[in-house]
Image (spheres, rainbow, N blue to C red):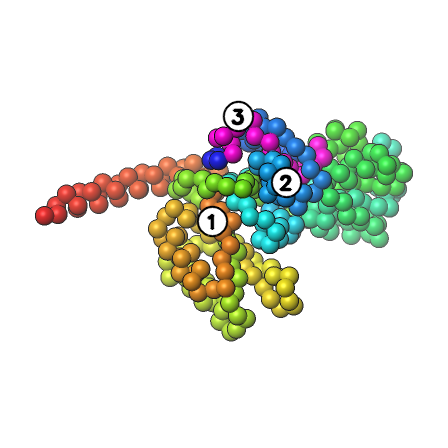
């Protein structure tokens, strides 16, 4: 981790709180971040704005879920409201649970509290087991659990949250694995105000592309820049620009690093042809095969370098 982590032995790390969120679980899986001064904040925008203001050196937030898709509070704040750079990504398997105070049964539940992205991952369970029950949006899964254990402990309110939140707030797990699909996972990112991590050989670059005009073939023209260079896009999503109805930008994740000439050339051409490109960072890609891919890339680069050097020695 460059920049803030290197400059401070214990960086202040803001994350979506309170204690017991999935975000905290994912953060604690990173030894260097877990050793920092952890600062729980009430919402995702609060985390990102705290980094922007310099109140914390690093921010840790969810950005994408395998069931529900983009965490819009994150992508919109990064795209439109802050100037931050992604430093790494972390992927955590997510298990949703229905938490209640002791003695509350399924038939007693009339309201369910959680962050909307979590509630949306459990639509089938809610429709099947709790049809007609009111869902109430709160800022995080753990906040929902804390409320159910405190101010909202009326014998009829439950929370959708991680199992660890039940231990933290003294609740019972009434139902486990209530998400709609197996292999549910959430992708989190670390952000800072400055610094681009060095290439590892297994990297992602994230950008936001703003069209110059809304005309036929405009998206195709953007995509051709990547296709012509055989650059793989791992994510493509449109978001409203919030300026006018029908105006959209595109959030893109691509394989590679801005330090690579091929990626730099693609971004250069893209920037010259569209209204704007906002760079969100180049960073190590997560995944169990990441270290092996990096080792293979390093070996391939060394072999290619030896080949080029051998050719250059023959000059003149």
Residue 183 left/right relative to 285:
right
Q: How crowded is mark 3: few (under 14 residues within 10 Å), some or many (20 or more)?
A: few
The residue lying toward the viewer, choosing from 310 and 167, is: 310
Quadrant of residue 27 within the rendered picture:
top right
- Residue at (67% x, 39% y) in the render: 16
Q: Depth check: give the residue in front, 251 or 180.
A: 251
The magenta segment is 4-22
Name which of mark 2 and mark 3 comes first in the sequence: 3
Alpha carbon of mark 2 to alpha carbon of mark 3: how far? Answer: 19 Å
The residue closer to the viewer here, 185 or 247, is 247
The percent position of residue 113, horizontal first and vertical second, equals 79, 44
Crowd band around label 1 with a 10 angstrom C-alpha radius: few (<14), some (14–19), many (20+): many
CB under 8 Å between discs 2 and 3? no
Residue 116 lies, in percent from the top left, at 72, 49
The disc at residue 141 is none
Q: Mark 2 points at which residue?
A: 50
Side of 244 where 286 appears, left or right = left
Looking at the rendered structure, the secondary structure element under dot 3 is loop
* Residue 2 drawn at (x, y percent): 47, 35
Q: Is mark 1 on a helix, strand or loop?
A: strand
């Amino acid at each position: 981790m460059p920049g803030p982590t290197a400059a401070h032995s214990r960086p202040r790390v803001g994350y979506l709180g309170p204690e017991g969120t999935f975000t905290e679980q994912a953060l604690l899986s990173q030894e260097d971040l877990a050793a920092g001064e952890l600062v729980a904040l009430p919402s995702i925008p609060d985390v990102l704005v705290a980094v922007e203001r310099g109140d914390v050196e690093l921010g840790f937030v969810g950005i994408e879920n395998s069931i529900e898709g983009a965490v819009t509070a994150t992508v919109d704040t990064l795209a439109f409201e802050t100037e931050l750079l992604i430093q790494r990504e972390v992927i955590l398997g997510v298990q949703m649970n229905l938490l209640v105070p002791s003695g509350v049964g399924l038939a007693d539940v009339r309201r369910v509290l959680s962050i909307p992205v979590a509630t949306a991952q459990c639509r089938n369970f809610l429709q099947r087991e709790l049809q007609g029950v009111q869902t109430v949006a709160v800022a995080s899964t753990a906040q929902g659990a804390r409320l159910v254990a405190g101010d909202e402990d009326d014998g009829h309110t439950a929370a959708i949250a991680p199992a660890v939140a039940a231990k933290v707030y003294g609740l019972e797990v009434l139902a486990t694995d209530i998400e709609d699909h197996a292999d549910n996972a959430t992708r989190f990112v670390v952000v800072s105000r400055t610094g681009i991590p060095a290439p590892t050989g297994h990297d992602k670059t994230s950008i936001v592309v703003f069209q110059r005009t809304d005309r036929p073939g405009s998206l195709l023209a953007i995509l051709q820049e990547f296709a012509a260079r055989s650059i793989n896009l791992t994510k493509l999503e449109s978001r409203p620009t919030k300026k006018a109805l029908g105006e959209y930008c595109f959030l893109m994740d691509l394989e590679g690093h801005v330090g690579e000439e091929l990626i730099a050339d693609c971004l250069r051409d893209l920037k010259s042809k569209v209204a704007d490109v906002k760079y969100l960072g180049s960073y190590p890609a997560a995944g169990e095969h990441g270290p092996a891919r990096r080792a293979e890339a390093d070996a391939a680069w060394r072999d290619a370098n030896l080949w080029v050097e051998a050719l250059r020695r023959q000059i003149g």
